[in-house]
Amino acid sequence: MQLSSLLQRFNEPETLKMAKLGRELRAKGFDITDLSLGEPDFDTPEHIKDAAKKAIDENYSHYTPVAGYLDVREAVCTKLKRDNGLDYTPTQIVISTGAKQSIANTVMAIVDAGDEVIIPTPYWVTYSEIVKMVGGTVKFIDASIENGYKINAAQLEAAISEKTKLFMFSSPCNPSGAVYSKNELAALVAVFKKHPGIFIMSDEIYEYINYEGRHESIAQFDEIKDRVVIINGLSKGYAMTGWRLGYIAAHEEVAKACEKIQGQITSGANAVTQRAAITALTGDMKPTEMMVIEFTKRRKKVLELVASIPGMDCSEPQGAFYIFPRVSAFFGKSDGEDTIENADDLCMYLLNKAHVSTVTGKAFGAPGCIRLSFANSMENIEKAFVKIKAALEKLK
């Protein structure tokens, strides 16, 4: 079959690939412990589920406006004002079927073929692939483990060219857990002020899973706010991954462009999810706070477990629910059957020999690392690391 050349421009997400391989082995009877997927292992809070049930009873079963119901967009504005001190109007909000679609809309609305997009590494796997899909060119900036996986103003300035159109980053970061402080963001803003043609996509989906205190959005700086596109959604902070609702907050022209694009692809997001979103965004945050307390305990335990494994070098994540250790010390080693040449090999080794699913750092632009999620029970995390440690000890 002669299919589109578009398929050759981008790769399948490694996160989904590893989850698929894990499911296949589990179906064959293997006891697979999953540390690969970025999905809270908590159920959606009851008050949000109740709102969805009420919406079904009230017959919210029809097509929705492309940009989202007005009262849902108003709820997003309320949340942005309450949590971030940011003023937006409903015309600046677009509701989408998950934050991934919000990112795709944003990139398609801003980037032309040949435009350069700057992405600090490590980064979420989908950023670069969406840029490639629209014909843009990706320019990476290495945010090393020694610098806490964050870039500085000098690195940003050096990466900018006359072709630069968009800067994409997340804080808290998937996969590293890095969180930018207000001062660190201000330093980047000083650079962006000198380059008025560059847009900034700020992925804030892990906003509430922050171990350092208050979340800081780069949109708080008025001098560049019109060029910032905030990406957020319900999946991580409200344990609503399967509900599929994301949103952007942006300058009205960008929002209208995203609405136009979305109108030709999915149209409006799910009606029932949107009604539940109002309750999530404006209702009781206690379940989210309790979830973060549990993640904090798991983070402490995971850091202790990683520290007990010689060869794993790890910075402390400030947010999200991942650790991203450097594992290059294992490259070139063998258990007598398998030789580990890179992070891909190590992940497959851990899956097949330890029966623990992880994700290669290569997918995130950091080929010397692997990502392990602690969005799993404490029991499963401890079980996984017993198996990981035993498997790594066989590598000589």
Image (cartoon, grey):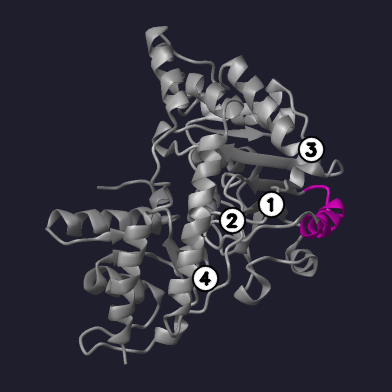
Residue 189 or 313: which is nearer the viewer?
313
Instruction: Tell me the amino acid under the disc marked 4.
Output: Ala
Rendered residue at 60%/44% (across/down): 208
Residue 391 at x, y = what percent?
Answer: 28, 79
Sequence-first tag of 2 and 4: 2
Is disc 2 placed on a helix, strand or loop?
loop
Q: CA distance from mark 2 to mark 4?
A: 18 Å
**Residues packed near mark 2 inside 10 Å, few (<14), some (14 to 19) or many (20 plus):** many
- 238 is within the stretch colored magenta: no
Sequence-first tag of 3 and 1: 1
Cβ atoms at labels 2 and 1 below 8 Å apart:
no
Sequence-first tag of 3 and 2: 3
Rendered residue at 12%/58% (across/down): 29
Residue to which mark 2 is pinned: 319
Rendered residue at 18%/56% (across/down): 26
Considering only vertical position in the picture, is 369 above or below 329?
Answer: above
Residue 55 or 211: which is nearer the viewer?
211
**Of the two numbered discs 4 and 1 in the rendering, the one whose residue sits closer to the viewer:** 1
**Of the two numbered discs 2 and 1 in the rendering, the one whose residue sits closer to the viewer:** 1
Residue to which mark 3 is pinned: 226
Residue 209 or 360: which is nearer the viewer?
209
Q: Is residue 150 left or right of residue 285?
A: right
**Of the two numbered discs 3 and 1 in the rendering, the one whose residue sits closer to the viewer:** 1
Sequence-first tag of 4 and 1: 1
Cβ atoms at labels 3 and 2 below 8 Å apart:
no
Assign the C terminus to one quadrant of the image: bottom left
Q: Which region is colored magenta?
A: 183-197
Residue to which mark 1 is pinned: 213
Residue to which mark 4 is pinned: 366
Instruction: Tell me the amino acid under the disc marked 1.
Output: Gly
